[in-house]
Image: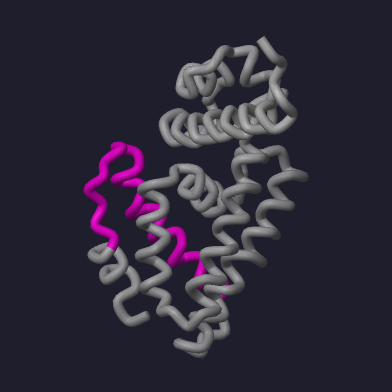
């Protein structure tokens, strides 16, 4: 039997981290910060030690999950809001992604709670990055529509409303979320 190549080892590492992150997002949706590494290992169908091989604790794991989700959230904002799409189209896209990818939902949910479940220095970093990468682009899009000087607050409330509505489906693990209907209800004039 020949030893694995560096590329094979990297492919295994990448696949396992993906498994762990998906399992962590799904577990967080069910248990919140009370999730344990054992829960994540079971959800990922990996050994307990394997999860600890990649992450020293749940906060380390959650930080990695949130950073990856923030990268994706920033790209979505650029793709929709800076390309001239409507705020409603952006909202529909967010709802659809949250249904398919719980890590993005976890990010937005924690953002609505000001990342209070994280250690404060880390929470402050995530709050600022979320504000710059997600809230500000949405606020700018709203500002051009409404000319409201409080567009940051309005953007945050829109995100919070979407999170609340999406949570009804995400927590039940239901695929029957009607993104169009929610967006029309919350973002009808945008």
Q: Nearer the viewer, residue 174 or 78?
A: 78
Is 188 placed left or right of 65 in the picture? left
Query: Does the magenta-highlighted stretch encompass residue 176?
Result: yes
Q: Residue at x 50, y 49 (%)?
A: 104
Q: Which quadrant of the rendered structure holds the N terminus?
A: top right
Task: Pick whichever, 110 or 53, lies toward us.
Answer: 53
| Snapshot quadrant of residue 9 | top right
Residue 46 in the image: x percent, y percent?
53, 17
Specify the farthest residue to the front.
1
Would you say the magenta stretch is mainly helix, strand or loop? helix
Q: Is residue 70 above or below residue 53?
A: below
Residue 34 rendering spot, x and y as whole percentages: 53, 26
- Image quadrant in which you'd find residue 127: bottom right
Q: Which residues are magenta?
A: 152-179
For the point 46% across and 62% down, the residue is 159
Quadrant of the image containing the C terminus: bottom left
Numbered circles on residues, count: 0
Compared with residue 138, is residue 20 higher up or lower down, i.e. above or below? Answer: above
Q: Position of residue 101 (x, y in %)?
A: 44, 46
Name the side, left or right, on which 148 lies relative to 127: left
Residue that lies at the very extreme toward the top in this rendered image = 1
> What is the quadrant of residue 189 in the picture?
bottom left
* Visual colour scheme: one colour
């Amino acid at each position: 039997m020949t030893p694995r190549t560096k590329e094979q080892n990297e492919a295994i590492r990448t696949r396992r981290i993906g498994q762990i992150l998906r399992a962590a997002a799904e577990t967080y949706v069910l248990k919140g910060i009370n999730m344990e590494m054992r829960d994540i290992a079971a959800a990922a169908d990996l050994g307990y030690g394997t999860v600890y091989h990649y992450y020293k604790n749940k906060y380390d794991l959650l930080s990695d999950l949130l950073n990856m989700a923030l990268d994706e959230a920033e790209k979505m904002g650029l793709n929709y809001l800076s390309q001239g799409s409507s705020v409603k189209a952006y909202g529909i896209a967010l709802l659809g992604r949250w249904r398919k990818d719980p890590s993005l939902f976890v990010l937005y949910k924690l953002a609505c709670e000001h990342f209070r479940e994280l250690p404060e220095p880390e929470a402050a970093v995530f709050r600022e990055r979320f504000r710059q990468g997600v809230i500000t682009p949405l606020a700018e899009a709203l500002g051009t529509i409404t000319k409201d000087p409080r567009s940051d607050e309005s953007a945050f409330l829109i995100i919070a409303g979407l999170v609340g509505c999406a949570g009804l489906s995400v927590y039940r693990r239901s695929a029957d979320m009607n993104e169009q209907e929610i967006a029309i209800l919350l973002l009808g004039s945008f």
